[in-house]
Each structure stands twice: as structure tokens, then as C-alpha cells.
Amino acid sequence: MLAAASPIFSWAVRQEIIAANPCSGVERNDTTSRERVLSDAEIAVFWPYLSASLKMVLLTGQRPGEVAHLHHAHVVDERWWVMPGAPDPETGWLGTKNAQSHRVWLSEPAYALLPDVLATPMRRGRMQHDMHSICVRLGVRDKVTPHDLRRTFCSKITALGFGRDAMNRLTNHKEGGIADVYDRHQYQEENKKIMETVARHIVTIAEGGGSPANVVALAARR
């Protein structure tokens, strides 16, 4: 609440509407980052209840807010989902979190979801509501959020041996620095391979095929 309200009051101070920001000096509650990922067993249990948009988050690892604003105009060159870094008023696109353009290969399972995602757009708030409802219905006490689905995808990238660099690259979580400026290699073929492999792996688990023998199933971290 403080993070949302304070900029508004700061603007009001600059406009000389009020004399001081009432949020100044208010102690903030300590926050801890979530580490929740779905175990293989949980993926299989949740899968039948997930909407197309929530499945898209799980199969692509992109941010729920970005999936919520996925637009057909941004799907080009066969199955590449191109996210402009800057806002795009014509499509309602809000821009990426880090303001850097991003390309995502839509794997076969993800591409199959595309018509439903486009036909029934689901805003992030609705995703949150639906995930909460699913958790209540399934009796899950350690609640799962849409972002936990993204985190689960990320964990599968590293579990399958592709590495943290690939995880950051595929989910547009760039660490910055001089390397990002000079590294112009787009890893196109490698990215396609990873996205297809991880998505197929998740679908196999979701549909009851279990985990490949050479992959250790991740337990839900609490």
C-alpha cells in the first residue's frame, strides 16, 4: 500500500497541493521473496483446473501481466511472440518490466493455447483470483500464485540442465552490465530448443506421464 500511495502523495507535494507526504516516516513491513515452485505432483493436480492464460504462464515462463496483454499483432514469423519494450497504445501493451524488447518462441503446446488466450483475455487480477479459487477448491494450504507458475517454469530450465543464463535470457530477466550491450547473439535456435523441451516436459508431467528418469523432481519449496 505504501509503495502504491507514496508516489501519488509525492506528486501532490510537487504540485503544491499538499505540504507533505503522509507516507514519509511510516515503517514498512519486512518482506521476504517467495520461493514457491510446484512439484511434479502438484503440476499434475493443478493442470486440469488452469485456464489457458495460466497454462501459458506455466509453459512459457513469461510474466503473468505480459501474458494478460498478449496480442495477436505481436505474434510474428511463425511462432515468435515479440514483446515491445515500450508501451504500445494501439494494442494495449504496457511494455516489458525492464523496458527491453523480448522474443519468445511459442512451443507447440503453448501455440495450441494461443486461440483460447486471445479469445478470452484474462487480466492479471483475474488470474490471481482464479489461482486462489483453485487452491481453495483443492485444499492447498500453501497458496499458489500466477507468478509461482513462472517460477516453476524457470526451475525446470535449470533442472533440465540448460543453466541460469538460459533461464534469465528466456524470461527476460537480464542482469545488465557491459556484456548485455555487446552480446548481439540472439540464441534463436537454442531458445527454440529449450522452450520446446521444457514445455513438452511440463505437459508430460501434467498429463500423467511422470518425470523423465534422469531428472530429479523438484519439491515445493516453502
Image (spheres, helix red, strand yellow):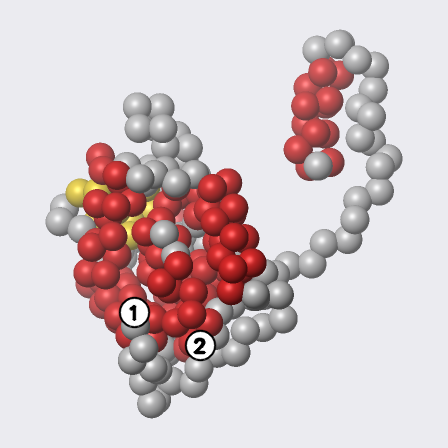
- Mark 1: give few (<14), some (14-19) or many (20+) Cα within 10 Å: many
The spot of residue 197 in percent (x, y) is: 26, 71
Residue 39, position as x, y percentages in the image: 48, 74
Q: Which quarter of the figure has residue 11?
A: top right
Question: Which amino acid type corresponds to the residue marked 1 in the rendered image?
Answer: Val
- State the residue position of label 2: 41
Above or below: residue 220 compared with residue 74: below
Q: Give the amino acid at mark 2.
A: Ala
Residue at the location (36% across, 63% down)? 48
Which residue shows up at 29% across the image and 52% down it? 104
Residue at the limit of the structure toward the front, as seen here: 137
User: Toward which corner of the image does residue 165 lie, by quadrant?
Assistant: bottom left
Q: Is residue 57 left or right of residue 37?
A: left
> Could you say whether the residue bearing mark 2 is in a helix, strand or loop?
helix
Image-based side of 184 in relation to 26, left or right:
left
Q: In the rendered view, would you say 154 is above or below 1?
A: below
Residue 15, image x, y percentages? 70, 11
Q: In the picture shown, does residue 202 fall above or below 147?
A: below
Secondary structure at badge 1 equals: helix
Asked whether 24 or 106 is in front, the reply is 106
**Relative image position of residue 127 (x, y in whole percent):** 46, 46
Q: Is residue 55 visible?
A: yes
Q: Nearer the viewer, residue 157 or 168?
A: 157
Q: Can you see residue 96?
A: no
> Where the N terminus falls, by quadrant?
top right
Q: Nearer the viewer, residue 134 or 67?
A: 134
Residue at label 1? 203
